[in-house]
Image (tube, rainbow, N blue to C red):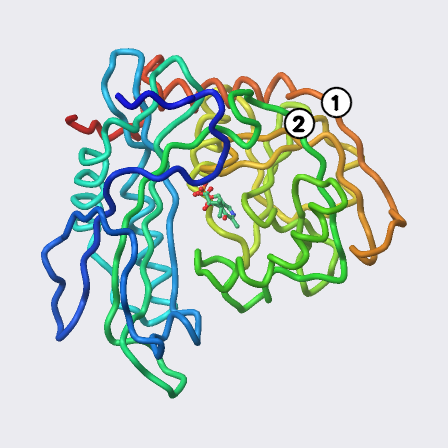
Amino acid sequence: MKNLEWGKLSFSYTKTDYIIYSTFKDGKWSAPVLTKDFTYPFSVYAGVLHYGSSCFEGMKCFRGVDGKVRLFRPEENAKRLIRSAKFLDLQAPSVEQFIEMSLMVIKANSEYIPPYETTASLYLRPLLVGVNPQLGIRSSSESMFIIMASPVGTYSGDRILVPGTAVVGRNYDRAAPNGSGSYKIGANYAQSLHPYNIAHAQGYRELLFLDSKTNSLIEEFGSSNFFAVKGNTYITPKSPSILPSITNASLRTVAEDLGMKVEMREIPLTEMAEVDEANSCGTAVVITPICRIDDKVHLEDEQVARSYTFANECGPKSRKLYDQIIGFQKGTLEDRHNWIMFVDC
Ligand code: PLP
Ligand code: COI
């Protein structure tokens, strides 16, 4: 195992030894190539550079209490990548190819899988891009599928469940009702960069988007889904323009296991005055408690139209949900839903 300062890792990039890639050309995928070269020369006319032919995934790999290496629900990430690629009319790898290459890149970088005792994990970033030269606006006929691996900590280094603030900037939309919001494509993130920069400069951890049609219903954060706990009910938004989070789906199942009611429905921002616990959830953020949501008409303005405040620590029900998910991922709980894929390394 590498001698890294595991406790100092945050959610940022650390170079590992290998990436893996495969290219789709002339109707077939090349054999996967493991390489130490992290650069790739493609045409300056590649569709990814001009027209955003890019989709990606994020998943985590853990060293368990028994020393075994566990990958969390990779088939779901593979299926979501295929769905995103379909939206971009890009050739996607099969579920089998996605998983085979994931296992290969984990094994090649196994020395970077953090020790069990830490809160860190090995994050995999599968990326699919359109690479053939083109000028007209059309989908790319040649694609490149790459998987990178980087050890990561939580957003707060080796601390877990550290609450953060979020802001709603009503003058910025994330996704149109019939647009691309439910796909994990680069374009969705590109348009969030500018408002994110403004929010971060103002000291907010997260940017919370409302639906672009009525500007009143909670959609999701720029990096993750939203869920709240209201009494014994887990509530999370239902919308055609949010990313179907694998973490959120897992949490809904676990919430039911714990005897909670689960509601996936429209959630007006104003309902935040009535909920007990509010959180973001996703692979990178896991569960991050939200201690305040500021609602701003204009993100740039100092003026806050209304604030919703929550406890400055993770709520008890959210903590229970967190412990379950981490328990599966680290092997301290029985994998009763069959969500774990063991990696032999
Ligand atoms: N929503 C957005 C916009 C995201 O980028 C992510 C991260 O992947 C999520 C939600 C959470 O999805 P998942 O739990 O599958 O990581
Ligand atoms: C993830 O949680 O895996 C993400 O992709 C979110 C963000 C880092 C883009």
Quarter of the figure with residue 111: top left
Q: In front here: 128 or 229?
A: 128
Query: What residue did someone put label 1 on?
Result: 311
The spot of residue 187 in percent (x, y) is: 50, 64
On the picture, is 198 further left or further right than 114?
right
- Mark nearer the N terminus (2 vs 1): 2
> Which residue sits at x=72%, y=36%?
165
Does the numbered disc 2 mark a residue whose Cβ is under 8 Å from ligand 2?
no
The answer to whether 334 appears left or right of 277 in the picture is left
Where is the C terminus found, in terms of image quarters? top left
Viewer-nearest of discs 2 and 1? 2
The alpha-carbon separation of the residues under discs 2 and 1 comes to 9 Å
Name which quarter of the figure residue 63 lies in: top left
Question: Residue 129, located in which quarter of the rendered image?
Answer: bottom left
**Contact, mark 2 vs mark 1 (Cβ under 8 Å):** yes
Mark 1 residue type: Ala
Closer to the camera in the image, 116 or 172: 116
Q: Residue 298, image x and y in percent?
A: 82, 58
Q: Residue at x 76, y 45 (%)?
A: 202
Disc 2 target residue: 163
Q: Residues within 10 Å of mark 2 (few under 14, many from 20)?
A: many
